[in-house]
Image (spheres, grey):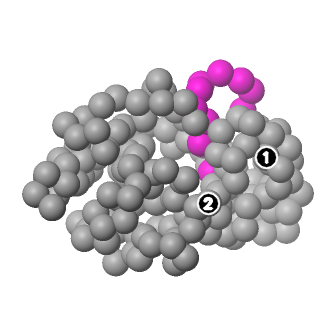
Amino acid sequence: MPDAAQVSTATPLISERTGWTLTQFHAWPESFTSAARSIAVACGASSVPVPGQVIEAADGILLRLHPQRLWLLRYTKAGILPDLPIGQGVVLDLSQSRCLLRVAMPAATDLIAKFSGLDPREPAFPVGAIRLTSMHRIPVTLWREAHHLAILCPRSFSKSLREVLEEALRHG
């Protein structure tokens, strides 16, 4: 994943990624299998992730948090977005509602453990895993990358979350 779209913050261990889009695909129960396959093919993923997993795709990352829901996080705004026929489900743009923070490993392991009930260590949270948790009572989405822990958090909470994480890193 290229780092050119990241904006540095007060500490080099935490960065905010910009210039991405997040699209939610929610398929009806009877059409999820075929809809998910179509979405995976359209974005260049090798398969459909199981719930709690992330799969790299040619056009970004395909995330699955829910049995009938996929999120497509694209690192560019270019390209044609997959669609669902109305009989299969609905599509919703979530890009403006979230911020994407990344915390470098191995610092992320201890840092996230201080603010969440989630165990961010291997093997409990392996590379490619995605989890919903809360930090300071605000729901966030975390997934484990090879060298970072990614945090999708509500835009209204991102500045204060970043400040709290940076403060914790500075003071151990």
Helix, strand or loop at disc 1?
A: loop
Residue 117, visible in the rendered structure: yes
Q: Residue at x 28, y 63 (%)?
A: 111
Task: Please indicate whether residue 72 sits to the left or right of residue 88 in the image.
Answer: left
Residue 12 in percent (x, y) is at 28, 39
Q: Is residue 38 above or below residue 33?
A: above
Q: Main secondary structure of the magenta part?
A: loop
Where, quadrant-wise, is the N terminus in this rendering?
Answer: top right
Task: Please indicate whether residue 69 sits to the left or right of residue 37 in the image.
Answer: left
Q: Is residue 156 above or below residue 64?
A: above
Q: Which numbered dot is residue 128?
A: 2
Q: CA–CA distance between discs 1 and 2?
A: 13 Å
The magenta stretch is 71-81
Residue denoted by label 1 = 45
Do the residues bearing badges 1 and 2 touch, measured as CB atoms within 8 Å? no
Residue 87, visible in the rendered structure: no
Which tag, 1 or 2, sits closer to the chain's start? Answer: 1
Residue type, label 1:
Ala
Residue type, label 2:
Gly
Q: Is residue 77 magenta?
A: yes
